Image (spheres, rainbow, N blue to C red):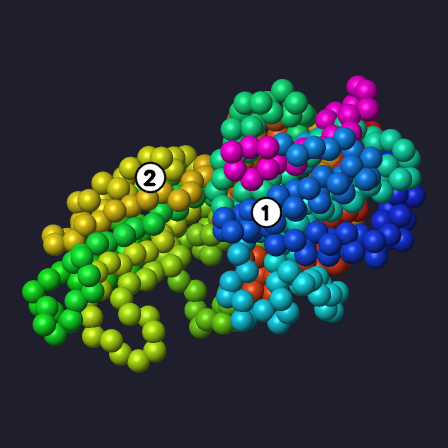
């Protein structure tokens, strides 16, 4: 009684997923060997080579695939739309990766993937080559087994996610708009709440990323001869940066910053509070003694639903070994703000610009340049597509997914929800210790395989719904 509906039969395809284990791992390793670092212009040819590699792979499994040239790095588009009358799923992912620095902290070179202890270690392993390849592999296995798919599928894989490129935005709103028509978008570019606990996200943060420069004298000066007579740009920068946040309450002090922030709803606070949480383990995993954040909020509330402000890099003056007595000519910092609904990155940029001009000390010049922006999103997790996704996750993990938010950003998601006006399903297969953007990034082979299996089940369930 009350038996769970097991849905359509995917057994033969899932057996293939198991028997093709090595081939699937090899495919990921080949993909990870290409250093598709989108933010560094000197890697542009490698980024393109990666796009071509992916297109060829998708063609080889039976999709119609092409490179879409843009003003920035190319997009890869592929489709298999022969399931008449069935829904259409658009899979999104990114084939570009973060820079691997600091290189000396990698146990093995970042683009020479190694398999250690059930994990694939390489830059991009989880973020996002491994996760997005899981979708491709699922489609490959379905086509091999049956020669057809239960639904129509489209793929749009970009090469500028990690570098805030706007090529995909232009495409989705312009030339690509009609061909991208679909019933839902599936994105696997996030993490599970915890090992063994499948998750579906309903929120991502937005982002404003800026570089701040403080310019003083036209050259570095002897700090004895001139010290005391001129404003020190490094000190001025430090004052500016520390003025962004109240050091005890954690509150961000830019006027207007919180105006559009949607408060956490009570049901969210209740649901977050019910999730497993071990503060000591959390801190210990990061090698710190205690956590710190905005007063009055829990860790999940802070990371998922409250806006934040962080220095991502800071420089100025002499950085070499030993002492060098100078007043630096200039100093700078990279600062990012994670935004929540309904903050608008453009409005926050203006507020910050105004605040910097007002607080910039005399005797130096302060400049700000925007390096990236993304809108925050909340997505709907109702509807039959989301239902099929949750059932598929339950099929492979043996438990119902939790519904959570995340602090990371995937800039195009807001555009999908708005311009395509369809549900966006955010289903990640990563783990929080996968070291995204850090040295020794890894993807667990079991999560990769589960991602493939879940995608098979999702497509079968959606086709049968
Ligand atoms: N995949 C991440 C975003 C992410 C990570 C979402 C973990 C949820 C959980 C994505 O590749 C990423 O790193 N995005 C950047 C966006 C930025 C460069 C515009 C980010 O969040 O820093
Ligand atoms: Mn990613
Ligand atoms: Mn990333």
User: To which quarter of the image does residue 310 belong?
Assistant: bottom left
Q: Is residue 394 magenta?
A: no
Relative to 12, say whether 226 is above or below: below
Query: Which x, y percent locates residue 324?
Result: 24, 76
**Of helix, strand and loop, which mostly describes the magenta segment?**
loop
Query: Which x, y percent locates residue 244?
Result: 27, 52
User: Circle 2 sits on which residue?
Assistant: 348
Pick the front one: 371 or 3? 371
User: Circle 1 sits on which residue?
Assistant: 45
Left or right of 464: which side holds 239? Answer: left
Label 2: element kind: helix
Label 1: element kind: helix
**Whole-number angstrom distance, CA of label 2 to CA of label 1:** 35 Å
Left or right of 304: which side holds 95? Answer: right
Query: Which x, y percent locates residue 2?
Result: 82, 39
Res 150 seen here: yes
User: To which quarter of the image does residue 100 belong?
Assistant: bottom right
Measuring 17% from the left and 62% from the top, which residue is drawn there? Answer: 232
Dot 2 or dot 1: first in sequence order is 1
Res 153 seen here: no
Pick the front one: 88 or 96? 96
Pick the front one: 28 or 411? 28
Query: Which x, y percent locates residue 447?
Result: 72, 55
- Span colored in magenta: 69-88
Quadrant where the N terminus sits is top right
């Amino acid at each position: 009684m009350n038996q769970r509906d097991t849905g359509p039969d995917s057994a033969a395809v899932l057996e293939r997923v198991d028997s093709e284990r090595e081939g699937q791992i090899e495919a990921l390793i080949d993909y990870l060997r290409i250093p598709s670092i989108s933010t560094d212009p000197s890697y542009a040819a490698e980024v393109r080579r990666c796009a071509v590699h992916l297109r060829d792979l998708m063609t080889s499994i039976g999709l119609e695939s092409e490179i879409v040239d843009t003003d920035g790095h190319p997009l890869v588009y592929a489709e298999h739309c022969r399931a008449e009358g069935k829904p259409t799923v658009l899979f999104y992912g990114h084939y570009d990766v973060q820079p691997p620095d600091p290189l000396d902290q990698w146990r093995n070179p970042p683009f020479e993937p190694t398999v250690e202890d059930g994990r694939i270690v390489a830059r991009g392993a989880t973020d996002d080559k491994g996760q997005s390849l899981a979708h491709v592999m699922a489609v490959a296995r379905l086509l091999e087994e049956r020669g057809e798919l239960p639904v129509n599928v489209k793929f749009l894989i970009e090469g500028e996610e990690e570098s805030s490129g706007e090529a995909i935005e232009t495409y989705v709103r312009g030339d690509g708009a009609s061909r991208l028509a679909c019933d839902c978008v599936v994105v696997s570019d996030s993490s599970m709440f915890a090992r063994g606990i499948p998750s579906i996200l309903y929120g991502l943060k937005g982002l404003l990323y800026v570089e701040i420069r403080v310019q003083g004298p036209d050259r570095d000066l002897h700090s004895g001869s001139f010290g005391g007579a001129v404003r020190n740009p490094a000190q001025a920068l430090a004052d500016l940066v520390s003025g962004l946040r109240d050091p005890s309450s954690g509150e961000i002090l830019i006027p207007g910053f919180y105006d559009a922030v949607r408060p956490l709803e009570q049901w969210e606070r209740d649901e977050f509070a019910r999730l497993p949480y071990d503060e000591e383990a959390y801190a210990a995993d990061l090698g710190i003694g205690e956590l710190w954040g905005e007063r009055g909020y829990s860790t999940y509330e802070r990371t998922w639903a409250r806006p934040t402000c962080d220095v991502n890099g800071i420089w100025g003056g002499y950085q070499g070994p030993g002492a060098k007595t100078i007043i630096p000519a200039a100093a700078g910092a990279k600062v990012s703000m994670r935004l929540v609904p309904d903050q608008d990155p453009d409005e926050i940029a203006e507020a910050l610009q105004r605040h910097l001009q007002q607080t910039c000390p005399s005797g130096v010049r302060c400049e700000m340049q925007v390096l990236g922006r993304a809108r925050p999103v909340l997505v709907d997790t109702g509807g039959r597509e989301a239902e099929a996704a949750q059932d598929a996750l339950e099929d492979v993990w043996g438990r119902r997914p939790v519904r959570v938010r995340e602090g990371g950003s995937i800039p195009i998601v807001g555009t999908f929800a708005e311009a395509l006006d369809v549900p966006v399903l955010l289903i990640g297969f990563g783990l929080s210790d996968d070291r995204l953007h850090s040295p020794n990034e890894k993807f667990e082979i079991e999560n990769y395989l589960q991602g493939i299996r879940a995608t098979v089940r999702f497509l079968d369930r959606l086709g049968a719904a």
